[in-house]
Amino acid sequence: MPTNTSNATVPVLTIDGPSGSGKGTVSRLVAQALGWHYLDSGALYRAIGLAAGWAGIDLSDASALVRCTFGTRVEFVEKDNAEPRVVVNGMDATDVLRTETAGAAASAIAAIPDVRAALTDRQRAFRQAPGLVADGRDMGTVIFPDASPKVFLTASAAERAERRYNQLKGKGVSFTLDGLLREILARDARDANRAVAPLRAAEDAVCIDTTGLGIEEVVQRVLALVSARVD
Ligand code: C5P
């Protein structure tokens, strides 16, 4: 994980959107194609939620959660072109972080303004040369408001649930398509309606509806936006 302070001249591409919109996979592939760093901000929220659970902290105890946020080490360990492993306080938590339980805990703590504030500098520190692809909910609106281009990915809730279903299949987690759809809709509502940094497209974001599109097609569209901006 980059450790230097942020560098305002380094280009940032933000990719925001609801869960299951494909932004994680698209962001990672775009970062690889560009040779840029990648920030998975959702993994940070998930990691804090997980560490809070380990410490037995009540998810409504804001001051304990802020202490936990500052005290939790999160490392992204990259190996070849595989998805980075997420190591929380020295433990590889990649698989448990993907579960809907971890997503729900992340979404609960993400609604607490002081927790978001405690993560701001940590996220901005990822802005390192030659560039950054930042994936999340508020990358273009709050964390990197000067980013260009900004992308907002959407997809129908049914398709997002199906993508999540296919992602989780064979991972030893118990779930149903209906249950996933309900969880996705509940998380969308919580993320879109919270008072602080609600999920919404930045005014200058380019929205791409990925329903029915393949990942590669979305990646190419995003790369075209970047080269239109950078060249
Ligand atoms: O993107 P992912 O599904 O991993 O994010 C998990 C949760 O973390 C989201 O539902 C959202 O509540 C929260 N989050 C956020 N802001 C971000 C990234 C994630 O509030 N930038």
Image (cartoon, rainbow, N blue to C red):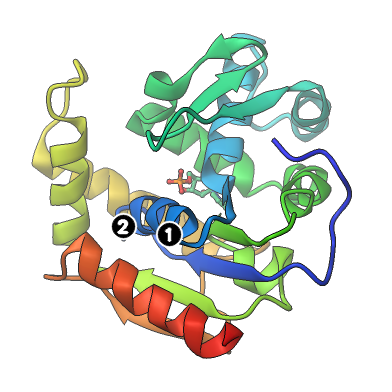
How far apart, in angstroms, are the residues tagged by discs 2 and 1?
Answer: 16 Å
Q: Quadrant of the N terminus?
A: top right
Which residue sits furthest right?
Answer: 5
The residue lying at 64 percent from left, 26 percent from top is: 75
Expressed as whole percent of the image width and height from the top left, the position of residue 13 reads 57, 69
Residue 33: mark in rendering: 1
Q: Quadrant of residue 54?
A: top right
Q: Residue at x 60, y 64 (%)?
A: 138
Sequence-wise first label, 2 or 1:
2
User: Residue 17 — which label?
Assistant: none
Q: Residues within 10 Å of mark 1 (few under 14, many from 20)?
A: few
Label 2 secondary element? loop
Q: Report if residue 136 is visible in the image.
A: no
Q: Is ligand 1 less than 8 Å from the beta carbon at label 2?
A: no
What SS does tag 1 mark? helix
**Residue at point 31%, 60% (across, down):** 21
Q: Which mark is residue 22?
A: 2
Name the amino acid type tagged 1: Ala
What amino acid is found at the position of numbered circle 2 in the picture?
Gly
Q: Are marks 2 and 1 in contact (CB under 8 Å)?
A: no
- Of residues 91 and 52, the one nearer the viewer is 91
Q: Is residue 156 left or right of residue 107?
A: left
Q: Which residue: 67% across, 18% down?
A: 57
Where 122 sits versus 221, above or below?
Answer: above
Is 93 in front, or is 195? 93
For the C terminus, the image quarter is bottom right
Task: From the viewer's side, name the closer residue of 230 and 191.
Answer: 230
Q: Is residue 5 visible?
A: yes
Q: Position of residue 182 (x, y in %)?
A: 23, 47
Q: Residues within 10 Å of mark 2 (few under 14, many from 20)?
A: many
Q: Does residue 34 lie above or below 94 as drawn?
A: below
In screen coordinates, is 126 left or right of 203? right
